[in-house]
Image (cartoon, rainbow, N blue to C red):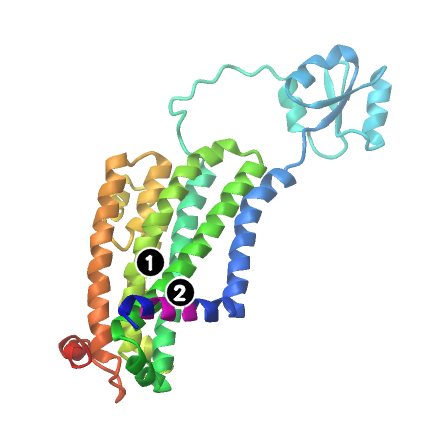
């Protein structure tokens, strides 16, 4: 069995185990439900246009505003329709707007004469979206990279703790063992993200929110390759951290650098998303570019060449961390006499390679 075949075998086994894991399946369903709810429910809950009772003489401006007009013979019939709950509001002579409890703003606006409005920045992002989109990108990358990264580390530790790793190493090359775990984790994480992205896009299309879809679509498309490379970088660190210890209880002692590498960019993007200078810097740093650069594309602050430049830097960084993580993994995998120092693992790689 060559290295490629062994890698596929290990990856297939890891994927089969994970697809039978109830926690993984539940988390995937939760992510999909959140994406669907965030994009489908708002237009459904907003309801249709207000229904208004009015005489034919008063109906024209209401129809022009997109309201549903129920024509009545006189003002008394209009008022009675409101009292009976048949309509949301009524327009009677005056004109006066009648409603039961709350002032119907749609009806009032339809009858009001509004001055012309000139937008000095017509392309400005809605403040709600400006807050939610950075948080969504950062949260998805943070949770997914943490979840699957920790699972890779735990799988390695469990194999060392039960000494089954000695059997595995005798059957497949060490590099294939690591590559299979990394490949399986990457496929599962990317698949989960792709599903979430597809549900979000479908939800926006279903809800008729074409404006948001046109804004978010390119950012989501670019987020996937950035996420892929960013996840490989983080997963390589988790694999190295897992190989350094022999018990699950000890993972906290070696995972601090990995935790910081994920958490600091998360908070940086969330809290500094309105700072153009900070976001420009974050969009080129390997640990934060998977969320910062797609966000800059969403806000219109990033040129196309910047996307390719940032992605190239992330590719180089991911390759470097993958090679370094593999060296630490190889140098510490069969050391089962307690926690292995990073220096020792780096030096001793050749002993099992």
Image quadrant in which you'd find residue 325: bottom left
Does residue 352 appear to the left or right of 53 in the view shown? Answer: left
Instruction: Locate residue 266, reporting x and y percent.
Output: 35, 55
- The residues bearing labels 2 and 1 have C-alpha atoms spaced at a distance of 9 Å
Q: Is residue 13 left or right of residue 33?
A: left
Residue at (30%, 62%) from the top-left corner?
234
> Which span is picked out in magenta?
6-14
Looking at marks 2 and 1 on the same chain, the residue that comes earlier in the sequence is marked by: 2
Q: Is residue 271 visible?
A: no
Residue 252 vs 46, above or below: the answer is: below
Q: How many numbered circles does the render carry? A: 2
The answer to whether one can see residue 35 in this image is yes
Residue 12 in magenta stretch: yes
The picture quadrant where one finds residue 228 is bottom left
* Spot occupied by residue 77 in the image (x, y as percentages of width and height): 86, 21
Q: Secondary structure at mark 2?
A: helix
Determine whether 340 is above or below 55 in the image: below
Confirm whether the magenta stretch covers residue 307: no
Residue at image location 21% in from the left, 56% down from the top:
317
User: Which residue is nearer to you in this view: 49 or 334?
Assistant: 334
Tell me the residue that label 1 is attached to: 231
The residue at the point 26 percent across, 75 percent down is 174
Q: Quadrant of residue 297?
A: top left
**CB contact under 8 Å: marks 2 and 1:** yes
Query: What secondary structure characterizes most of the magenta part?
Result: helix
Disc marking residue 148? 2
The 10 Å Cα crowd at callout 1, few under 14, some 14 to 19, many 20 or more, is many
Residue found at the very far front of the displayed protein: 1
């Amino acid at each position: 069995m060559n290295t490629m075949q062994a890698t596929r075998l290990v990856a297939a086994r890891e994927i089969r185990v994970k697809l039978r894991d109830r926690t993984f399946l539940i988390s995937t369903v939760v992510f999909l439900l959140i994406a669907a709810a965030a994009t489908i429910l708002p237009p459904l809950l907003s309801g249709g246009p207000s229904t208004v009772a009015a005489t034919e003489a008063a109906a024209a401006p209401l129809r022009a505003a997109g309201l549903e007009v129920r024509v009545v013979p006189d003002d008394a019939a209009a008022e009675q329709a409101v009292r009976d709950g048949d309509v949301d509001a009524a327009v009677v002579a005056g004109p006066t707007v009648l409603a039961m409890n709350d002032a119907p703003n749609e009806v009032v606006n339809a009858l009001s004469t509004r001055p012309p409005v000139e937008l000095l920045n017509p392309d400005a992002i809605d403040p709600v979206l400006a807050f939610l989109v950075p948080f969504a990108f950062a949260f998805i990358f943070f949770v997914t990279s943490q979840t699957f990264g920790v699972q890779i580390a735990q799988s390695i530790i469990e194999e060392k703790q039960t000494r089954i790793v000695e059997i595995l190493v005798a059957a497949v090359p060490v590099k294939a063992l690591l590559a299979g775990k990394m490949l399986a984790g990457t496929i599962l994480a990317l698949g989960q993200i792709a599903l979430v992205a597809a549900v979000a896009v479908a939800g926006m299309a279903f809800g008729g929110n074409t404006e948001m879809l046109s804004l978010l679509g390119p950012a989501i498309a670019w987020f996937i390759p950035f996420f892929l490379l960013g996840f490989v970088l983080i997963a390589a660190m988790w694999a190295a951290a897992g190989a350094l210890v022999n018990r699950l209880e000890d993972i906290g002692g070696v995972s601090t650098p990995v935790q910081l590498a994920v958490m600091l960019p998360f908070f940086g993007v969330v809290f500094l998303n309105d700072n153009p200078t900070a976001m420009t810097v974050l969009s080129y740093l390997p640990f934060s570019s998977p969320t910062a650069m797609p966000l800059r594309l969403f806000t219109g602050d990033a040129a196309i060449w910047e996307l390719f430049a940032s992605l190239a830097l992330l590719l180089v960084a991911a390759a470097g961390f993958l090679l370094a993580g593999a060296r630490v993994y190889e140098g510490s995998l069969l050391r089962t006499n307690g926690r292995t120092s990073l220096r020792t693992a780096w030096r001793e790689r050749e002993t099992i390679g």
